[in-house]
Image (cartoon, rainbow, N blue to C red):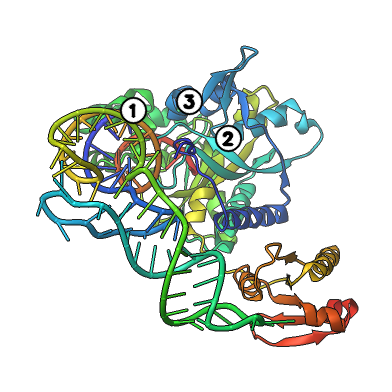
Amino acid sequence: MEYKAVRGVEDLIPPESLKFEKVVSTFKEVVERGGFKEVILPIFEEARLFTRSVGEATDIVQKEMYVFEDRGGRVIALRPEGTASAVRAYVERGVYAREPFTKWFYVGPMFRFERPQAGRKRQFFQAGAEVFGLSSPGIDAEVIKLAQDVLRRLKVEATLEVNSIGCKECRPEYRKALLVYLEKKLELLCKDCKERFSRNPLRVLDCKVEGCREVVKGAPKITDYLCRECREHYEKLKEYLKLLKVEFKENPLLVRGLDYYTKTVFEFKSDKLGAQSTVLAGGRYDYLVEELGGPKTPALGFAMGIDRVMLLVEEEREEREGVFVITRGEEAYRKGMEVVNLLREKGLKSEIDHRQGSFKAQMKAADRLLYRFALIIGEEELQNGFFSLKELSTGKQEKIESLKELLARL
RNA sequence: GUGGGAGUAGCUCAGUUGGUGGAGCGCCGGGUUGUGGCCCCGGCGGUCGCGGGUUCAAGUCCCGUCUCCCACCCCA
């Protein structure tokens, strides 16, 4: 094969593409019901936008971004996630000045230069939702509930974990306490965690290595260090989740990989996906709008991994629909094309077999393409001025005298 | 970036100690000269991932490389 899709990217052809559409449309329906409106955001941005928002020290920025210089000398990055662009647009367009609060959603490809694996591609798709201008834990609960609704409607089973990772006030306190604890156990940690100890100690908490997990068991918990405001926010959130009948598990070890999160973080995981088990995740990011040049604005959001969700969605069998026109001879073919055209104008799905093969071949196509009806126009029909309409599922065939009758019959 | 497994027809996969590449499904056609699904028959379809090496001879052995899968890592 001379030409191949590049490593880590893949084509979606039917029926996979139909599944994609199903996931996206379900997501849209659910969030639109919650008052969210769609934004179409650029696929590339200045690289420094992501460095600033996602975090200088994160792996995404350090080694996974597609960065290049464009012909004008700008340093560009293919977006590795959606929130940064949404916030940038929110600030740049002055949306905060026109609306009391803002609910946006987006769908599209993201890019990360990672080692490909099932559920982890270099081009992958996310559907995300963001809320700006609301600080109440009630909206946190509502957003989590919407996320759960999306997964439920797609019949994707996933467990929800929530945590609070505090704010500028309390997280440094916790960090300090954690460092003090970890320093004593440094020798017991794995190589990566020794590294994390100095760079990003919170990430030691979700290390998978047995020895580290042992150490972590005795570590101080962030929830014990939350300031009054964060603690109340977290307590209220849990109350509201119960009110909305959302089942969740508290996980004090849940920390996210992006620097901008504050207070609420959450994650929906599936146990059917192997290592890449997170299907949807998000949290609050109350400082990001300000950091990107906007006014102080509380915000939160989540992103769903469409590719991962697709691995868990069952294929829907298609319903038989529409009319497949079968003809013999030039005159019938012309008549057939007119009929197809008419049916489409009337809003019906219809095709004609342009191959002009045997009736058997054409009938077979009507069946394989899952048409509900085959409309036959042959010599006999032409001569006596009628159509034969066969319903594929029952095999019953009837005479149709006119186009009017045909339309009435369908 | 690290470690392991795998690449043979459109798909799923057989292929013996190296000796002229197969099956099932799918596709096209025929059995039924105007009718799909089930059955029977036939046909199309392969640079054996790519490149190099060993050999009289390589799908098979060796080296390199690319891609996919699994795990680490990371994350949605």
Tell me if mark 3 has few (under 14), some (14-19) or many (20+) residues whose alpha carbon lies within 10 angstroms of its own.
Answer: many
Q: In this rendering, is residue B23 above or below A60?
A: below
Between A9 and A138, the one nearer to me in the picture: A9
Give the Cα separation between the discs numbered 1 and 3: 16 Å
Q: Which amino acid, mark 1?
A: Arg
Give percent across and percent down for residue B73: 34, 35
Between A134 and A123, the one nearer to me in the picture: A123
Provide the secondary structure element on which disc 1 rests: helix
Provide the secondary structure element on which disc 3 rests: helix
The residue sitting at 37% across, 23% down in the picture is A199
Q: Earlier in the sequence, mark 3 or mark 2?
A: 3
- Numbered badge on residue A61: 3
Give percent across and percent down for residue A164: 48, 42
| The C terminus of chain A lies in quadrant | bottom right
- Residue marked by disc 1: A196
- Numbered badge on residue A285: 2
Give the Cα separation between the discs numbered 2 and 1: 22 Å
Q: Which amino acid, mark 3?
A: Val
Query: Which quadrant of the view contains residue B27?
Result: bottom right
Q: Chain of mark 1?
A: A
Between A63 and A146, the one nearer to me in the picture: A63
